[in-house]
Amino acid sequence: MSSPPIPPQLEHLGTRPFSFYPSILNVDHNEWLFRKATWSEVLVVNCKSSVEIWIPRRFLGEISRADDPVLIVGLNKELEYKGGSVWPVQRRVIEMPVAVGGSSTVGVEVERTEPAPVVGIRVPPNTENRIFRLIAGALLFAILLYLGAVNLTRVGEVKQRVAFTARDQAYLDLSSRDDYTAVVSKLGEPGADRWLSESGEIQYRALTYPRRKYTVILMGSNRSQATYIGTMDDNWRPLHSVELYSGGTTSSLLRGLKRF
């Protein structure tokens, strides 16, 4: 029969700090110093808390040969500190009670030879109704949004059409008797006012209205007697003409008039 191993001697450690492995439970700092020893116990002191603990020699294991980064003193059992002493840690396993007439199934694995049953998941009726209402509400909102966008587009087109029509028809109020003063009173001040030439038997005057996008043409034997003869668009094409006293209209005259 072999004899138990001789516990190591810690006296030679002197003032060298060391650590226990595994560390002692319920002690935060695992750094110790040797204080003194008897034939059965060793007294160590914690470097941080200064707690002194007597450790039986039978719990001491081997001492590491290297002390980098720290010297290790092994323990044969995991110890815990309580009541001023160290005690071996006891791991308790709580076994659940077995029901009357039942059998323990701990550690017994039942081999299943049949596939696991498929359990159908049924959505509650309330959930189905809620989902249906959400989908219907989203569709209704999308339809209303689309109709609103269409109505806004149509309103904008109508406004543009009305404004465009009113702007184009404003010159219809002009007649061959209207001079510069009459034109301004009906259409307002022009954006530009220019004459075709400084001199000549016939004088032509152009009153341009950029916002209305047309130019009103006046003609006369002199500048003081110039009256309305028609309207040209932005491309210098006749939009409106008036009747001549001799018969016919001023359309041909406007078509032959060069832009100025």
Image (tube, helix red, strand yellow):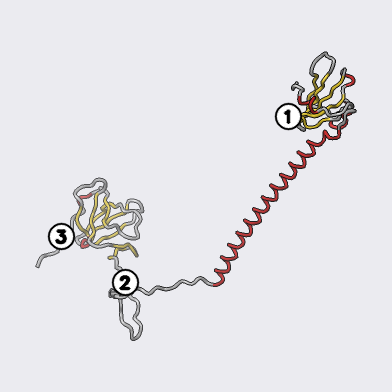
Q: Which residue matches tag 3?
A: 6
Q: Residue furthest left?
A: 1
The amino acid marked with disc number 1 is Asp
Query: Distance between the Cα atoms at labels 2 and 3?
Result: 33 Å
Q: Residue furthest front?
A: 247
Q: Residue 38 at what x, y percent from top left?
A: 21, 59
Q: Residue 189 at what x, y percent from top left?
A: 83, 28
- Examine the image and state in which quarter residue 143 appears: bottom right
The amino acid marked with disc number 3 is Ile
Q: Given this view, does label 1 or label 3 mark the residue nearer the observer?
A: 1
In the figure, 64 relative to 113: above or below? above
Query: Distance between the Cα atoms at labels 1 and 3?
Result: 118 Å
Q: Residue at x 53, y 72 (%)?
A: 124
Q: Residue at x 35, y 83 (%)?
A: 99
Query: Distance between the Cα atoms at labels 2 and 1?
Result: 101 Å
Q: Residue at x 87, y 22 (%)?
A: 226
Q: Residue furthest bottom?
A: 101
Helix, strand or loop at label 2? It is loop
- Examine the image and state in which quarter residue 120 appears: bottom left
- Circle on res. 116: none
Q: Which residue matches tag 2?
A: 93
In the figure, 105 relative to 260: above or below? below
Helix, strand or loop at label 3? It is loop
Indicate left or right for 156 with 55 as reference: right
Q: Is residue 257 visible?
A: yes
Indicate left or right for 98 with 149 as reference: left
Indicate left or right for 146 with 35 as reference: right
Q: Which residue matches tag 1?
A: 234
